[in-house]
Image: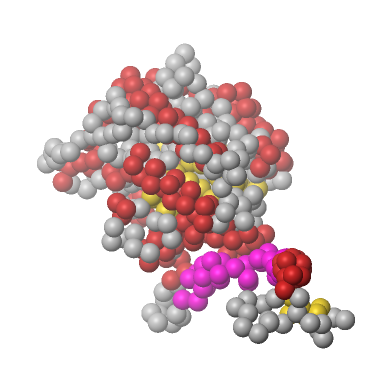
Amino acid sequence: MDPRLYPPSGAATPQLFVEDEPYDEGAQPLYNALLKSLQSAMSAATAIDTERRSTPHIRFREAQNTRPQHRHPGLDPSKASTGVVWTTERAYEHGFLDNPDEWGNLGQGAPEVEDTVPHAFHKPTTLDVSVSSREYGPVAGIMPLRKAVANLYNAHYREGKASKYTWENVAIVPGGRAGLIRIAAVLNNAYLSFFIPDYTAYNEMLGLFKNFAAVPTPLDENNNYELQPEKIKEEVKRGVQVILTSNPRNPTGHTVKGEKLKEIMDICRGRCTLIMDEFYSGYNYTGDCDGTRVSCAEHVDDVDNDDVLILDGMTKGFRLPGWRIAWVVGPKEFIKAIGSCGSYLDGGANVPFQEASIPMLEPEFVKMEMAALQVHFREKRDFVVKRLTEMGFIFKSIPDSTFYIWLDLSHLPTRIQNGLGFFEECLKEKVIVVPGIFFDLNPSSRRDLFDSPCHHFCRLSYGPKWATLIKGLDGIQRVLAKHNALPADFTEATQPPLDL
């Protein structure tokens, strides 16, 4: 006889029956066990293994691909938002804009800007605005700031070297993205290689220009997504003329330094241009938190002949993202072009903020500031990693830089084991994270989102202040508890510092 589902008279839930047999109440446990087995098999057959069966992924596709067309002639609204911006828009729909202080925003790509870092200098609350700063400033930046940046790099990375940076090796730009766009504007007809996962804005920025072809290269999870000299050799051999990468890396929180970094630069020398995004150089926990920053400037042979462009600024290391003061350091010929193209791209950086940045770049002062930064953010990293480990998350290695955690979700229940699903469940607990697919190469148009190598990851930031971190971690714990995903022996043992 065929087993079928029949509810007994008055039963609230389906029970497993055998046709034409009398109902035996004593056999109900067996019936229920068979029913559970059948339901499990049905669930496996319809598992969420493709974006077409996942509500969060369908919602994301609709947001990206079904915008009204031809409402405004000439407008392409698909270029108006990145994945990271979309996460914030989704948070707004859940009330983040109305009551941001109630949220654990672990999605922000910025450090705490309050005067909350012990032994760090207090940021200016007012600025002296000179008469000259009311004028248009030079699009390559004011001379005193360009000199201050060159002096900082020479003091920290060029001691004892014959080749030194001068003001002509520095262009001041209104933020890191503006610097990247200026660099992209002056590149010739070339193949440009960049690596995934990496900074999300690279995708949109690189897609704007037709003077080069951007070539994505995936990095190996087993190597902590670190750049390997062998990978660089492969790229150069296949004709790549420009390489763009972040170091320290966003979103994985790892740094290439020392001999490995030197080897990479030796491979590139004379064969391709190396663009190094070093905005997280101050967040270096590989040593004793003595203020030492990691930079490829240390391994440049000749500042005018080595085709190495370095981006950094006041945004991350000095915790002043709102100032929009950044710089590009490189060969004079490159810098002249990068400075000039600012006249038609962005108009240059804010002059009063340029003037205010100069005294902050005294080399010894910078080292003390970075030391305070490193001690504080390493403590936050250790706290976050311990809390997440207690919740059952696994770390193959501990991040040694930046303020990001690249969190592996693959061990979690189906509904929350991918970045978008986890993100949506976190929103319900007033927590923001960034789904890992947004650090892949434009996966929304390239392939099924479930096939992305970043699918089972999300990025958490421990950049915010302590109170925000604790709210975010508490919310993640509630998400796991709701889905019965906490370890059987879970106990919350890690406590934040007592002096918060």
Image quarter of residue 406: top right
Q: Is residue 213 visible?
A: no
Q: How is the image coloured?
A: secondary structure
Q: Residue 148: give x, y in percent of width and height.
A: 31, 28
Instruction: Give the magenta range.
Output: 38-67
In the picture as drawn, the residue positioned furthest to the top comes out as: 160
Chief secondary structure of the magenta portion: helix
Question: Where 326 sits versus 82, above or below?
Answer: above
Image quarter of residue 254: top right
Q: Is residue 117 left or right of residue 130?
A: right
In-front residue for pair 73/428: 428
In-front residue for pair 178/280: 280
Q: Quadrant of the C terminus?
A: top left
In-front residue for pair 175/491: 491
Q: Residue at x 67, y 77 (%)?
A: 14
Q: Residue at x 31, y 60 (%)?
A: 97
Q: Residue at x 35, y 53 (%)?
A: 103
Q: Residue 440: give x, y in percent of width and height.
A: 58, 54
Q: Quadrant of the N terminus?
A: bottom right
In the picture as drawn, the residue positioned furthest to the left comes out as: 131
Q: Residue at x 50, y 21 (%)?
A: 287
Q: Residue 243: give x, y in percent of width and height.
A: 58, 43
Q: Residue 83: give x, y in percent of width and height.
A: 48, 59
In-front residue for pair 58/249: 58
Task: Let me know if residue 36 is in the magenta part.
Answer: no
Task: Let me know if residue 64 is in the magenta part.
Answer: yes
